[in-house]
């Protein structure tokens, strides 16, 4: 006899306001809570949900909801964190896609596993981390990535992807491109290399070294520094709705950059190994005078122009209107098209 399965946890007409860090109002026609890998297969085998379009939701930290969602929303809540292996050259940590990213970073630090500390306090779920290859203070997810398991939303099969298969780029991966909406990440394995070395070359961290005189910080200290830096300049989504950086830092040719420097010598720029140059989008937006400004109930954060915030009761449309206005003024002054980082639905 087949073993009876727990039914899927389905909610009709579910508010998504609590499920996106911007706090934007939208209703999902159907919301399914995915608590295990088997739940994904149940969705695939379901006569109605199996064939319906789907939206996979992690912590909702990289999302702008501009309307109600007709697609079946899969809210990934798969738990579990463990040290999978301890090799001579790395610790391998495995986490369920529904765990909070910061929770995993804090857990690793508490276990004495260093390597994730630069990525502390990034909002969102573990399953979303590879999707946009999260990064901060000199470390990107791809630098600490071992592999992940994802369930194909058509076949119901679980596949394991290594780093090349994920095609990581700057805030980008195969899950934003060819595999967008086609699979659900259920588990992620992180690789923390040993011997550990602190990554403290980022300007804000160099300042901490200078301020404290600690030139060889341990992982816990770097973790505390990163938390302090982020708290000082980024709004806590639990208090002020936001989705982190709203735009990617644009990459331009050396020639374009020289042009901009000619007119604006102060422009913050980082030369890349291939000869192109990354510009600080926050600086460009700030230079156009947007810091602290609002359009309707959406605004530009006072302490970091790259972050758009919900000043209370904003709609997704207001956020998008503000974003367009910023794009236009940056284009008008610098000839650069800023590309949004979050997914706009
Ligand atoms: N700047 C200004 N005015 C502003 C904002 C920034 O002049 O209003 C200048 C800063 O002074 C600095 C430069 O622009 O010289 C860059 O700013 P910052 O160091 O704060 O980093 P960022 O480019 O704004 C990126 C990531 C963040 C990540 C930080 C730290 C992107 C789009 N953003 O921000 O990631 O935490 O570096 O590594 O790559 C995110 O993706 O959601 C995110 C927060």
Image (tube, rainbow, N blue to C red):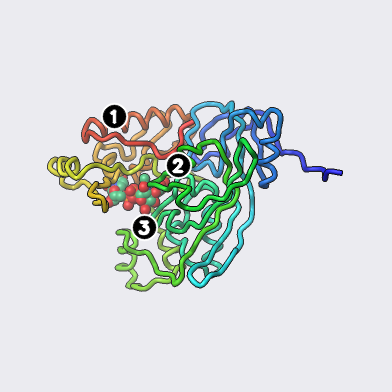
How far apart marks 3 and 2 lie (CA) works out to 20 Å
Residue in view at x 67 percent, y 47 percent: 36
- Asked whether mark 2 lies closer than 8 Å to ligand 1, one says yes
Q: Mark 1 points at which residue?
A: 328
How far apart marks 1 and 3 lie (CA) works out to 30 Å
First of labels 1, 3 by sequence position: 3
The one of 309 and 16 positioned closer to us in this rendering: 16
- Please say if 87 is above or below 66: below
Q: Mark 2 points at which residue?
A: 243
CB atoms of marks 2 and 1 within 8 Å:
no
* Residue 64 located left or right of residue 258: right
- Please say if 344 is above or below 168: above
Asked whether residue 235 appears in the rendered view, the answer is: no
Q: Give x and y (percent) for residue 287.
A: 24, 40
First of labels 2, 1 by sequence position: 2
* Residue 343 located left or right of residue 270: right
First of labels 3, 2 by sequence position: 3
Residue in view at x 45 percent, y 63 percent: 223
Q: Residues within 10 Å of mark 3 (few under 14, many from 20)?
A: some
* Residue 336 located left or right of residue 5: left
The one of 90 and 288 positioned closer to us in this rendering: 90
Q: Give x and y (percent) for residue 285.
A: 29, 39
Q: Name the residue under label 3.
A: 138
Q: Give x and y (percent) for residue 270.
A: 25, 51
Q: Residue furthest right?
A: 1
Q: Give x and y (percent) for residue 107.
A: 56, 62
CB atoms of marks 3 and 2 within 8 Å:
no
Quadrant location of residue 117? bottom left
- Asked whether mark 3 lies closer than 8 Å to ligand 1, one says yes
Q: What element carries label 3?
A: loop
Q: Residue furthest left?
A: 262
């Amino acid at each position: 006899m087949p073993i009876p399965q727990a039914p899927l946890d389905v909610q009709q007409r579910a508010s998504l306001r609590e499920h996106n860090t911007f706090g934007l109002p939208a209703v999902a026609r159907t919301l399914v809570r995915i608590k295990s890998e088997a739940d994904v297969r149940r969705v695939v085998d379901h006569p109605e949900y199996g064939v319906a379009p789907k939206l996979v939701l992690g912590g909702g930290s990289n999302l702008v909801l501009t309307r109600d969602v007709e697609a079946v929303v899969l809210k990934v809540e798969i738990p579990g964190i463990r040290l999978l292996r301890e090799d001579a050259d790395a610790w391998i940590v495995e986490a369920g896609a529904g765990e909070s990213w910061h929770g995993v970073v804090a857990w690793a630090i508490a276990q004495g596993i260093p390597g994730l500390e630069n990525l502390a306090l990034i909002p969102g779920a573990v399953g979303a981390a590879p999707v946009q290859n999260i990064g901060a203070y000199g470390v990107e997810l791809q630098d600490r990535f071992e592999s992940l398991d994802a369930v194909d939303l058509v076949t119901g099969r679980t596949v394991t992807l290594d780093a090349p298969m994920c095609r990581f780029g700057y805030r980008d991966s195969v899950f934003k491109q060819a595999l967008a909406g086609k699979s659900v990440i259920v588990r992620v394995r992180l690789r923390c290399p040993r011997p550990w070395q602190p990554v403290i070359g980022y300007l804000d961290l160099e300042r901490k070294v200078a301020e404290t005189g600690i030139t060889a910080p341990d992982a816990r200290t770097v973790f505390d520094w990163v938390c302090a830096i982020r708290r000082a300049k980024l709004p806590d989504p639990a208090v002020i709705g936001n989705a982190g950086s709203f735009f990617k830092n644009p990459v331009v040719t050396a020639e374009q950059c020289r042009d901009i420097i000619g007119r604006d010598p102060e422009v913050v720029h980082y030369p890349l190994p291939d000869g192109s140059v990354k510009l600080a989008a926050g600086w460009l937006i700030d230079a156009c005078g947007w810091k602290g400004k609002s359009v309707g109930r959406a605004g530009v954060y006072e302490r970091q122009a790259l972050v758009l915030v919900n000043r209370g009761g904003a709609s997704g449309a207001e956020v998008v209107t503000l974003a367009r206005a910023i794009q236009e003024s940056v284009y008008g002054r610098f000839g650069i098209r800023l590309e949004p980082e979050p997914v706009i639905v």
